[in-house]
Image (spheres, grey):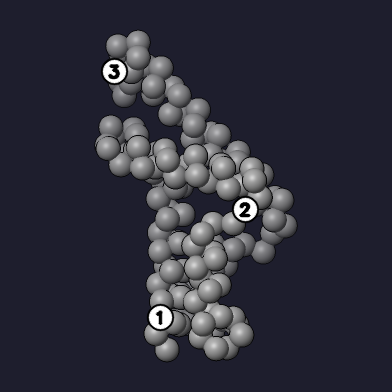
Amino acid sequence: MIYKVLADLSVLFHFLWILFIVFGIIFALKRSRLAWFHFGGLLFSLFLNILGWYCPLTYLENYLRMSCGDGGTYDSSFIIHYLEPIIYPDLPEMIIRIGEVLFVCLNLVVYGIIAKRYLRGRNPFA
């Protein structure tokens, strides 16, 4: 039972991490220190996708599901039912990886623009 709860919590955390990566550029635009964490997450995502690796949270979720003793099958909890299709869309893996790489590159361009304006001494947010 505890492994199912932990597996659901890992799925929830995975979803929150994805939201942070998707909307984290706001921290850079607001000049928050969390932007550094977001920037690191973007680089980590780029690294994983270029090498064809999976997110460590995916491995954790799979391990916890296997530890439940149900062969890794998913039950129909609220979290599984609604969040997993968002985290793991039913698309070819290559399409997902290319989309993620393009998304990260777009975010890195925004970070580059902010850095360029900062280094020129202008207010990058004006």
Query: In the rendered view, would you say 119 is above or below 48?
Result: above
| Residue pointed to by mark 1 | 5
Label 3 vs 2, first from the N-terminus: 2
Quadrant position of the C terminus in the picture: top left
- Residue type, numbered disc 2: Trp
Report whether 95 appears left or right of 40. Answer: right
- The alpha-carbon separation of the residues under discs 3 and 2 comes to 38 Å
Which residue is more in the foreground, 96 or 40? 40
Q: Residue furthest top?
A: 120
Give the residue pinned by disc 3: 123
Disc 1 crowd, CA 10 A, few/some/many (<14, 14-19, 20+): some
| Foreground of the two, 79 or 35 | 35
Residue 111 image point, x, y percent: 43, 29
Residue at figure coordinates x 50%, y 28% from the top left: 109
Badge 3 density bin: few <14, some 14–19, many ≥20, Cα 10 Å: few
Q: Position of residue 38 (x, y in %)?
A: 39, 42
The residue that appears at 69% across and 56% down in the rendered structure is 93
> Which residue is identified by label 2?
53
| Residue 113 spot, x, y in % from top left | 44, 22
- The answer to whether residue 116 is above or below residue 64 is above
**Amino acid identity at mark 3:** Asn
Callout 1, which amino acid? Val
Q: Could you tell me which quadrant the N terminus lies in?
A: bottom left
Q: Which one is in front in this view, the residue at disc 3 or the one at disc 1?
A: 1
**Residue 26 position by quadrant:** top left
What numbered label is drawn on residue 26? Answer: none
Is residue 36 visible to the viewer in this orientation of the structure? yes
Q: Which secondary structure lies at badge 3?
A: loop
